[in-house]
Structure formats: structure tokens, C-alpha cells
Image (cartoon, rainbow, N blue to C red):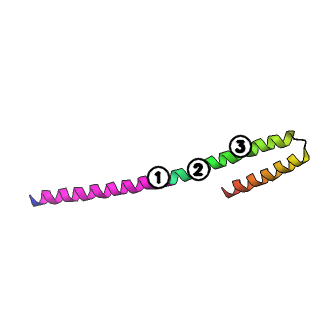
Amino acid sequence: MGDAGEGLIDAESRFQERLAEREQERHHRLAVVPVDAERKRRSDSLQLARTELKRQASVTQHVLRKEQIKKALQDIESELGKL
């Protein structure tokens, strides 16, 4: 009977170890995914803004507005470079 009891204790230890490993993996996955999703969202947003500003630059005739667009495009390029 002593051997059967030891087997149950070993099985319980392995179960606890696996449970801890799964919990750690779950925390790791949850920590990594939102960061990448946020980076992707930010990148997509900046790229859309860049596309719109380029469109505006192609149709704008006003000199001051063209300068504003040029500065905004530089800022967007800088932000995209940081990502």
C-alpha cells in the first residue's frame, strides 16, 4: 500500500507542476500579445494618416497648408521609424 500512496503523491506533484507551467505560459501570452496588437494598431493608424496627408498635399494649392502637411508627414515618418 505504501507504493500506491507514493505514486499518488508523485502524480499530484506532476499535476501541480504542469498547472504552474500552464499558468506561467498563459501569463506570458497575455503579456506579449497586447503589446504587439497596440504596435500594429498604431502603425496602421500612422500609415492611414500618411496616405491621407499625401492625398491632401497633391490637391492643396495654399503654400501654408502645404508646409503644414510637409511637417505633419515628417512627424509621421519619425513616429513610424520609432515603431
Are there few (<14), some (14-19), or many (20+) residues within 10 Å of tag 1? few
Give the residue drawn at x 64%, y 49%: 42
Q: Is residue 34 left or right of residue 41?
A: left
Q: Amino acid at mark 1?
A: Arg
Which numbered disc, 2 or 1, marks the residue closer to the eye?
2
Q: Say which label, 2 or 3, has the lower sequence index.
A: 2
The kind of secondary structure the magenta stretch mainly shows is helix
- The secondary structure type at the circle numbered 1 is helix
Q: Which residues are magenta?
A: 3-31
Q: Is residue 22 left or right of residue 31?
A: left
**Res 61 quadrant in image:** top right
Residue 38 image label: 2
Q: CA distance from mark 2 to mark 3?
A: 15 Å
Q: Which residue is mark 1?
A: 29
The tally of labels here is 3
Q: Which residue is mark 3?
A: 48
Give the residue drawn at x 78%, y 51%: 72
Give the residue drawn at x 80%, y 40%: 55
Give the residue drawn at x 16%, y 60%: 6
Viewport quadrant of the C terminus? bottom right
- Where residue 79 appears, as percent x and y from the top left, is 70, 55
- Where residue 38 appears, as percent x and y from the top left, is 58, 50
Q: Is residue 27 magenta?
A: yes
Check contact, mark 2 vs mark 3: CB within 8 A. Answer: no
Are there few (<14), some (14-19), or many (20+) residues within 10 Å of tag 3? few
- The secondary structure type at the circle numbered 2 is helix
Q: Say which label, 2 or 1, has the lower sequence index.
A: 1
Q: Nearer the viewer, residue 31 or 62?
A: 62
- The secondary structure type at the circle numbered 3 is helix
Q: Amino acid at mark 3?
A: Leu
Q: CA distance from mark 2 to mark 1?
A: 14 Å
